[in-house]
Amino acid sequence: MYRQTLTKIPSRGLAIASSRRAFTTSLRVMAEGDTGATRSLGSLGQGDAFQKREKANEDYTIRQREKEKLLELRKKLSEQQDHLQKLSDHIDELTKDQGGEKN
């Protein structure tokens, strides 16, 4: 915050000294626990019930997304394995009718 200080100048001799401090600023400092200050969970991860609930909700959401991604990857893997099996069957069918050694 900026604050302007008004000073009463009694004489000409003090005008130079007081004019240097006519405009001052103050620094706003917040300590832990004050309004607007961030709370640290500490090394043990301790916090209030709200923080624990929020962390649990975030962890649950992340696990759900990872589960969905894993299911999608398994589905793609299954489709690719089916495709490879069809290609292998097709190759076997083509080579079965060729001359030479019977397959």
Image (cartoon, rainbow, N blue to C red):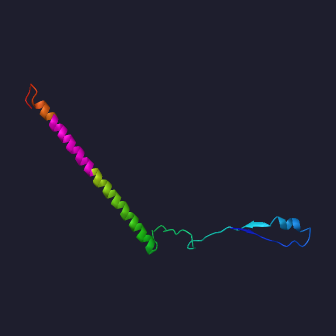
How many labels, in total? 0
Q: Main secondary structure of the magenta part?
A: helix
In the image, is 85 to the left or to the right of 31?
left
Which image quadrant: the N terminus? bottom right
* Vertical arrangement, residue 100 with respect to residue 43, above or below: above
Give residue 40's position: percent from left, percent from top: 51, 68
Front one among 66 and 3: 3
Q: Residue at x 32, y 54 (%)?
A: 69
Which image quadrant: the C terminus? top left
Q: Residue at x 14, y 31 (%)?
A: 94
Q: Write down the region rendered in magenta.
A: 74-90
* Vertical arrangement, residue 7 with respect to residue 67, above or below: below
Of all residues shown, which one is farthest toward the top? 100
In the image, is 34 to the left or to the right of 19?
left
Give residue 63's position: percent from left, percent from top: 34, 61
Give residue 12's position: percent from left, percent from top: 92, 68
**Magenta span contains residue 75:** yes
Q: To which quarter of the image does residue 66 belong? A: bottom left
Of all residues shown, which one is farthest toward the left? 102
Q: Residue at x 41, y 71 (%)?
A: 53
Q: To which quarter of the image does residue 38 belong? A: bottom right
Give residue 6's position: percent from left, percent from top: 80, 71
Q: Residue at x 42, y 71 (%)?
A: 52
* Vertical arrangement, residue 94 with respect to residue 10, above or below: above
Of all residues shown, which one is farthest toward the right? 12
* Vertical arrangement, residue 96 with respect to residue 25, above or below: above
In the image, is 69 to the left or to the right of 80?
right
